[in-house]
Image (tube, rainbow, N blue to C red):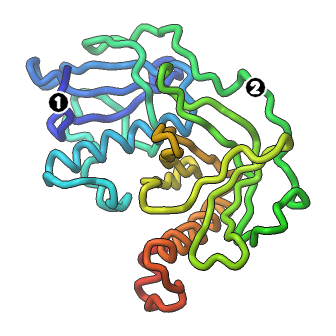
Amino acid sequence: MFLISEELEFRTSQSDGEPTLLWRDLQGDVDEFYEFVASGTNAPTKAFFETCMYRAMYERKYKTSADNVRDEDLVEFIWRCVHPHLHLTNFLVSSIRQPVSSHKGKAAAKKTSAKVNDTARSPQSPASSSTSDPSLDVIIEKNAELFLWDRSGGYFVLEAAVSARVVQRKGANYSFFLTATSQEGQVLAHRISSQMMQRWSPTTWSLTWNNVNENGNQSSWCLRFESQEAFEGFRTEFTKRAWESLNQTSWDKVKVKRREFMA
């Protein structure tokens, strides 16, 4: 068991083409470390795990919740090589490694049988806009891959290729939903609110968030977009609607400089 903190010098690397997690053995020498191999881990799972690590470091250091922190606030926790003699050619990218096997020392970590089930299904193309609910105004629509967090396995599982939308029900002010629709029909419709704890990863073009259903059960989801342009466009519109939902007022009333900062 390890207390998550900056002292661990948490970072990522690769072993035989597989993503790995590394951190210092605080009871050992300066060049001794632990390594976990995340065999077959996909990009959304990578981004989710690494962000969780940085958020935990932030909360420990500043003794406050990381629920509303920006990506820029977490940069200080990204490890930089200060021991060149270790030969760890690793500068972090925004991806998540799910630890599945441990190894201490400098040798390569042994691979495990852990797998990420993002190829178990063969999703069809996302639904076209012609299947949209006529009672909804579509604010933005982009194609994406939808993943669901598997609690028992500890990784994101590919659900379907979907059409991701930010929508507003006609006649309802400042009430927005994030929806995902496949060729088989609507997969989800989550109300956009501050409770979603959404996180954006520019590196993997992905959005992760939490949802609590009417029975109180929580689930975690991820959308991975097809391009940076699609990712940026969706993030901009989502941010606007999340702000409007929270403040119950128009985005147009936000000062221009603040808009640029928030979006």
Q: Position of residue 95 (x, y in %)?
A: 47, 40
Q: Residues within 10 Å of mark 2 (few under 14, many from 20)?
A: few
Secondary element type, mark 2 = loop
Q: Is residue 22 left or right of residue 245?
A: left
Q: Quadrant of residue 8?
A: top left
Q: Position of residue 188 (x, y in %)?
A: 67, 47
Secondary element type, mark 1 = loop
Q: Is residue 80 left or right of residue 217?
A: left
Task: Give the residue at mark 1.
Answer: 3
Amino acid type, residue under disc 2 in the picture: Arg
Which residue is at the front of the view, 43 or 165?
165
The circle on residue 121 is: 2
Which residue is at the front of the view, 119 or 87?
119
Q: Residue at x 65, y 52 (%)?
A: 189
Q: Identify the image quadrant of the N terminus.
A: top left
The mark tally for this picture is: 2
The circle on residue 89 is: none
User: Which residue lies most toward the right here?
Assistant: 130
Q: Quadrant of residue 133?
A: bottom right
Q: Residue at x 76, y 49 (%)?
A: 181
